[in-house]
Image: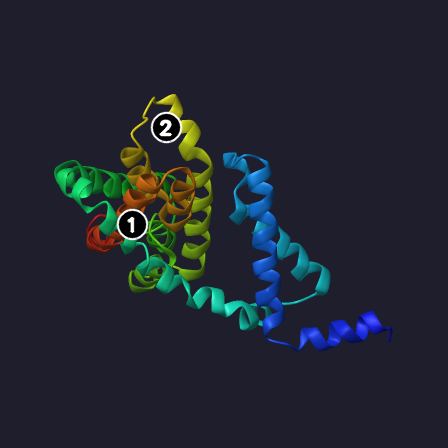
Amino acid sequence: MTSVENLWVYLHETPLLWLTITLAAYTIADSVSVLARRHPISNPIIIATALIIAALVMTGTDYKTYFGGAQFVHFILGPATVALAIPLVDNFKQIRRAAIPITLALVAGSATAIITAVGTAWLLGAPHELLMSLAPKSVTTPIAMGLSETLGGLPSLTAVLVVTTGIFGAIAVAPLMNVLKITDPAARGFAVGLASHGMGTARAFQANVLAGSFAGLAMGLNGLMTALLVPLLTLLF
């Protein structure tokens, strides 16, 4: 074997290889997004995902091997989510003043996200298993997968739907809000955080710290609200 092949064989056995590739992919993706002036389509998550998929295909690496090396990124999602409490504390006075609008928007938004997805699939004749997989699509992945499994859905399918929802929301939020002439960063942030969980929250922080704070709040509250509302679907579908 050539020296390059020997190096690859060595690195392939190193657990930190795919962690390094993951971080490098996101660094490249974020740089591209900056060059594109944070255009909604240049979402770093989409670009980084494409780069990692390409690397896995070219090297013939299966997902289990990849996750074994990159699982540290998965682990720090928990602390990163908890860290969202910092901007919430910084903007607590404004959040408290908006308590009533937040509550109304939370209930309406959470119910709409569930009913539109599940109702449409039900009208199209989707089986119960698919309906339960769709129901928690707008909350963060750990909560969504747990709810899906509890209700008889497919957690793996739910995870795909969650990611798809997040990507779509992160791309569509700015153009949609501009068309609707909604300029208040708090309202924009809360809407995208509620509908598109972590990916929407990340996008909100890129635009404005206040928007990111409200997006993080919406993401957390929607997880709780969806956990309360989704089980009621078993009485309807």
Quadrant where the N terminus is found in the figure = bottom right
The percent coordinates of residue 65 (x first, y second) are: 59, 72
The percent coordinates of residue 27 (x first, y second) are: 58, 53
Is residue 235 something that shows in the picture? Answer: yes
How many numbered marks does the figure carry?
2
The percent coordinates of residue 51 (x first, y second) are: 63, 53
Q: Is residue 82 left or right of residue 199?
A: left
- Label 2 crowd bin: few (<14), some (14–19), many (20+), radius 10 Å: some
Q: Is residue 33 left or right of residue 166?
A: right
Quarter of the figure with residue 210:
top left
Asked if the residues shown at circle 1 and circle 2 are in contact, with their CB atoms under 8 angstroms apart, the answer is: no
Q: Earlier in the sequence, mark 1 or mark 2?
A: 1
- Label 1 crowd bin: few (<14), some (14–19), many (20+), radius 10 Å: some
Secondary structure at numbered mark 1: helix
Up-down relation of residue 68 to residue 44 (above or below): below
Which labelled disc corresponds to residue 177?
2
Q: Which of 62 and 15 is in front in this view?
A: 15
**What residue is shown with label 1?**
87
As measured in the structure, the alpha-carbon distance from the residue carrying label 1 to the one carrying label 2 is 23 Å
Q: Nearer the viewer, residue 160 or 142?
A: 142
The percent coordinates of residue 145 (x first, y second) are: 36, 60
Instruction: Identify the residue at image location x=65%, y=61%.
Output: 56
